[in-house]
Amino acid sequence: MNYCVDPLHYHRRETREVKVGNVGIGGNNPIRIQSMITCDTMDTDASVQQTIELANVDCEIVRITAPTVKDARNLESIVHGLRERGCDVPIVADIHFKPDAAMEAAKWVDKVRINPGNYADSKKFVIREYTDEQYAAELARIRERFSPLVDLCKKRGIAIRIGTNHGSLSDRIMNRYGDTPLGMVESALEFARIARDLDYHDFIFSMKASNPKIMIAAYRLLVARLNELGPDWNYPLHLGVTEAGEGEDARIKSAIGIGSLLADGIGDTIRVSLTEDSPHEIPVAQELVRLFVKSDASKSEIRNAKSEISFDPFSYQRRAADTISVAGIGDPGQQVKVGGGELIRVVVGRANFEKIAHKIEKIGDYKPEILYENAGIAEVDPHDEIAIAKLNAERSAQFVTLRDDVGLPVIAAFRLLAARLQARHPILLKDVLNCRASVSDAQHGGVSQNVAKRALSDIDGQATGRVSGSERVKRPTDFLETLLIASTNIGSLLCDGIGDAILVQGEEAPGQALRLSYNILQAAGSRIFKTDYVACPSCGRTLFNLQTTTAKIKAATLHLKGVKIAIMGCIVNGPGEMADADFGYVGGAPGKVNLYVGKTAVKFNIPEAEAVDRLKDLIREHGKWVEPMPQATPLEAVP
């Protein structure tokens, strides 16, 4: 199965166009940027105002939740208010659980998003075996509930997004396919077949997950299945990492998932989901599109290359390198193991190391582990067949990376290296292949001296509440570029199973480069060294203030290394997205919180004022609580 034209050469996937209001998605249209408002849908004025605020920062499509028929009916007033004020941005209704709400919403909006996992379906996590007859009966029931919406959307000429979420697969899908990318794809295809049977084709797919590896695999598998089904299954794709969280971690996780697919030519519209005010999502999405969508698909970037890859694009497995020892940082003679089942290591260049060597014991978990110049790393051009053959002829495994002057896109170059180099040789990944170049061209292997200096709100400050509004510190966007490029290039390759160590060389500040290195490893699920958070973006379904609640939970638990905590505003994706979380904090009712261990709710209707302390008690009960230790020197303070 093929998920893209060529994994070593950019080609944007060809799709049909689907119109959402006055905006075309797919076809020859640019990648569209969208977001979602966060207020109560029954608050018409606030809904209109938040939508206009998004349109004013170039958001092209705006989604509004409609959890009930009453909310769906108020979409008429919201759309009317927007058009009266001269705002023509297309409006999408977000529907979960209630077909009646979808039918009402479809009267007023430009597109309806439905989730196959809970649209007229059950999600009780019941273990049950379906016979073929029982499964067919379930599909007939879904067809009966979904067909009226398709007929209405067809009559009105509006679009549908068939939006699968990893966290809300139906029991029917879970029991036949499991909690897998294949289950996500089949869930969407069930609904797509119904739409096609009714000669309706104005729909778009999405395959969202909070785990970038699952999200990437699901989209690749979907595209491969659509290719198998035939050329008329060329429907556009909406990309997003759901429940990404906030701050730098969320931007990194979003870049790994969205950026890696864009770099492969997959995706027609994107939403970066942040647990922050919605306008903060737009510059991140715009930058991802600018950096990883290439305009010239006719120029071959891999000279005389056979487009072979060394990994299974649909199922993660780490490349099987041998374990070797290299010189580590510290006492003379200290060795660090690389490859095999060892941790993916963090490498630093001598120039940056010398800037922080005097504080190396004070920077906690962000320590560099290997000095690049001392590790005996072989630098090669993947086109150089003689150099590759010489390495492959070596009796012992060698630590290998790319030369900085190969002039190729980073992802394609490392894929080519991994395909031609024997798997026994560990590979060091780099974020860019010319650290003196502007990062804005680094993913293309080129050099640019024209780096834009637009301002960006301080990423950490807006996430943690340390600064807000007019007090926010401003920094140039080149760090956002650095972050997105490093996250996409290194993160994508890690999700392909390639890489035994990483070197971020596109960021000159040593503290930021080290922090970025470790945070990429964490976001890719490759090395967990701190508390991991899964947090949904706010919307009209949310039952508490997600931003302030997330800040409170982080303040209480940030020191718990390796513990994963999910923070969910409602139950739509809560239990499912918490499948691999240790603990969950989920809105159960207004002012009330339910606490979970994995997918299982164990504490119910806790007053919100007590919920964070009760979460701490729950972590203690399960033996994962430790008292916080004195803080190490923040990396931001390292010169």
Image (tube, helix red, strand yellow):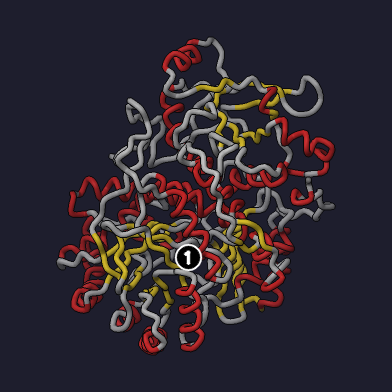
Quadrant of the rendering where the C terminus is positioned: top right
Residue 260's x, y, as percent? 44, 46
Asked whether residue 36 appears in the rendered view, the answer is yes
| The quadrant where residue 518 appears | top right
Judge by depth and name the residue closer to the eye, 110 or 209: 110
Residue 180's x, y, as percent? 40, 50
Number of labelled discs?
Answer: 1
Q: Is residue 351 above or below residue 423?
A: below
Residue 122's x, y, as percent? 37, 68
Q: Residue at x 56, y 13 (%)?
A: 396
SS at badge 1: loop
Residue 43's x, y, as percent? 49, 88
Q: Residue at x 48, y 12 (%)?
A: 390
Judge by depth and name the residue closer to the eye, 459 or 256: 459
| The quadrant where residue 401 appears | top right
Q: Residue at x 81, y 52 (%)?
A: 631
Judge by depth and name the residue closer to the eye, 145 or 27: 27
Q: Does 592 sit left or right of 576 as displayed?
A: right
Q: Does 45 sit left or right of 625 as displayed?
A: left
Q: Identify residue for label 1.
A: 573
Task: Classify mark 1: residues with Cα within 10 Å, few (<14), some (14-19) or many (20+).
Answer: many
Q: Is residue 217 above or below residue 568?
A: above
Q: Is residue 409 above or below residue 282?
A: above
| The quadrant where residue 150 appears | bottom left
Amino acid bearing label 1 = Asn
Q: Does 505 sit left or right of 445 as displayed?
A: right
